[in-house]
């Protein structure tokens, strides 16, 4: 369980069975260590001792994250003709959260240790305090929304909240989208954005944190057609997990039972993933009925929810199918799925077996030797040419060629491109073995197999 200081943020986490058959007790530690060492994810505010439940994405992490978001937006918004997007404000009128029920009901059960005064979620502890063994007080509800003040006055009229989810911004803009674009049922509104929850016990790296990012869709349908739309989105979630490279055997559907679903939902599926610390929820798919539009119509006094179905000509209150995707949990699932240890040749290695679509670096370009100006100049020429066509290209001339390969493997770069004397067609190279017919070709090395082949420079962009 993470404490309030940086020393506990990257603490040991519990582990579970992992498909790569490596030591289970320290897999999460290995992933966390690699993320920090190679610039994927850092502890938040680390130089000041950190802040539990917050993380900063480093240079490679932000590329990975952007690849995920861009792929999601393309698949679910740009490639469809029944979807549009919004980017709503994080700060909203507090009446939004009163109408949605968050102010009164967005709570977790909390207990406080009578001895050390530490607080815990009830479902995360036993009968005694895990820190000092003390007795717990009575259970009480803890609202997880972050409260803030707007303006110079600090009174009840200035209270606002950091949004606990992105869906609210979609529902309050429903009327605006209808008035601007007059979409026909069924149609969806999508959003990617930050959300904030004052988690009692953030844990398991970026799986449960206090600041996170969501990719959400509210898909509006005729109530009579909700089941077919629900099935369509169920299949779409699996298409997505395949697109980002998650092993099919690691993704599981959990049909949420009557007693555990929200009162307004007739069906909810949790898509769970085999994380190193156990099988946990990755995505959600919920049928929300007309609860949200009706609640905001009542709370705002605006007519939001009646629309004419062009297929039937009838006026209906649209119902909603909600596919919800967590960006940070997606990143963690991708990292856990990609983390691999094997032996290549006689050397053990660690590498990230990223799907090429999401890999933060698509290829790295090397000169065989960095002290040979002609090699370096040609390598820079190839690097700059590729970077214009494939922006996520890395230059690397640090250390010997073997160390560069291992470093690129560890960050998940699919291919490495080496410019050597054969590329120059230079018969005066130290080995005396340059072949003129290999001029303007390079060595391209595959991350997963270590296999190498010669390829023409002109074919590189299409290959990677």
Image (cartoon, helix red, strand yellow):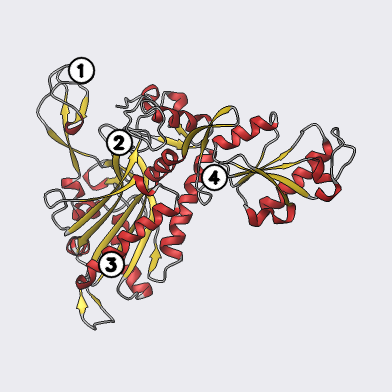
| Residue highlighted by disc 1 | 116
- The disc, 2 or 4, on the residue closer to the chain's N-terminal end is 2
- The disc, 3 or 2, on the residue closer to the chain's N-terminal end is 3
The answer to whether any part of residue 45 appears in the image is no
Of all residues, the one furthest to the bottom in this rendering is: 313
Instruction: Give the foreground label among 4 and 1.
Output: 4
Q: Residue at x 46, y 28 (%)?
A: 33
User: Residue 32: image x %, image y %?
Assistant: 43, 30
**Quarter of the view holding residue 84:** bottom left
Report how far apart the C-alphas of labels 4 and 1 lie in the structure. Answer: 44 Å
| Residue highlighted by disc 4 | 360
Report how far apart the C-alphas of labels 2 and 4 lie in the structure. Answer: 26 Å
Report how far apart the C-alphas of labels 3 and 4 lie in the structure. Answer: 33 Å
| Residue highlighted by disc 3 | 229
The answer to whether any part of residue 92 appears in the image is yes
Of all residues, the one furthest to the right in this rendering is: 428
| Residue highlighted by disc 2 | 278
- The disc, 1 or 2, on the residue closer to the chain's N-terminal end is 1
- The disc, 4 or 1, on the residue closer to the chain's N-terminal end is 1
Q: In this picture, is 56 found above or below 301? A: above
Q: Quadrant of the N terminus?
A: top left
């Amino acid at each position: 369980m993470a404490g309030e200081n940086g020393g506990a943020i990257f603490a040991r986490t519990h582990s579970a069975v992992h498909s790569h058959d490596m030591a289970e007790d320290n897999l999460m530690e290995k992933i966390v260590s690699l993320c920090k060492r190679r610039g994927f994810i850092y502890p938040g505010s680390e130089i000041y001792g950190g802040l539990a439940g917050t993380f900063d994405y480093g240079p490679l992490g932000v590329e990975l994250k952007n690849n995920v978001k861009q792929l999601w937006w393309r698949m679910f918004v740009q490639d469809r003709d029944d979807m549009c997007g919004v980017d709503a404000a994080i700060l909203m009128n507090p009446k939004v959260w009163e109408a949605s029920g968050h102010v009164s009901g967005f709570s977790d059960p909390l207990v406080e240790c009578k001895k050390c005064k530490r607080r815990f979620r009830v479902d995360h502890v036993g009968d005694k305090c895990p820190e000092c063994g003390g007795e717990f007080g009575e259970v009480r509800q803890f609202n997880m929304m972050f409260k803030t003040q707007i303006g110079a006055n600090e009174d009840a009229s200035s209270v606002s909240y950091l949004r606990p989810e992105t869906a609210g911004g979609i529902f309050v803009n429903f009327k605006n989208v209808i008035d601007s674009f007059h979409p026909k049922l069924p149609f969806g509104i999508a959003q990617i954005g930050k959300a904030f929850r004052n988690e009692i016990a953030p844990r398991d790296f970026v799986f449960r944190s206090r600041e996170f990012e969501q990719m959400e869709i509210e898909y509006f349908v005729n109530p009579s057609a909700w089941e077919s739309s629900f099935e369509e989105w169920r299949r779409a979630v699996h298409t997505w997990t395949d697109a980002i490279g998650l092993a099919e055997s690691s993704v599981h559907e959990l049909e949420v039972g009557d007693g555990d679903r929200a009162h307004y939902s007739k069906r909810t599926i949790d898509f769970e993933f085999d994380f190193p610390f156990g099988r946990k929820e990755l995505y959600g798919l919920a049928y929300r009925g007309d609860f949200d539009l009706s609640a905001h119509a009542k709370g705002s006094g605006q007519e939001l929810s009646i629309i004419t179905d062009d297929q039937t000509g009838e006026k209906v209150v649209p119902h909603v199918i909600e596919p919800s995707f967590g960006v940070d949990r997606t990143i963690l699932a991708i990292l856990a799925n990609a983390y691999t240890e094997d032996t290549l040749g006689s050397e053990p290695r660690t590498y990230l077996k990223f799907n090429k679509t999401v890999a933060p670096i698509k290829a790295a370009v090397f000169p065989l030797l960095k002290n040979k100006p002609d090699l370096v100049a040609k390598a820079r020429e190839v690097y700059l040419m590729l970077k214009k066509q494939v922006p996520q290209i890395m230059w690397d001339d640090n250390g010997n060629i073997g160390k560069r390969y291992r470093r690129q493997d560890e960050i998940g770069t699919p291919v490495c491109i080496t410019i050597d004397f054969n590329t120059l067609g230079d018969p005066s190279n130290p080995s005396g073995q340059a072949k003129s017919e290999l001029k303007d070709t390079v060595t391209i090395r595959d991350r997963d197999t270590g296999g190498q082949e010669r390829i023409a420079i002109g074919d590189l962009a299409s290959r990677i």
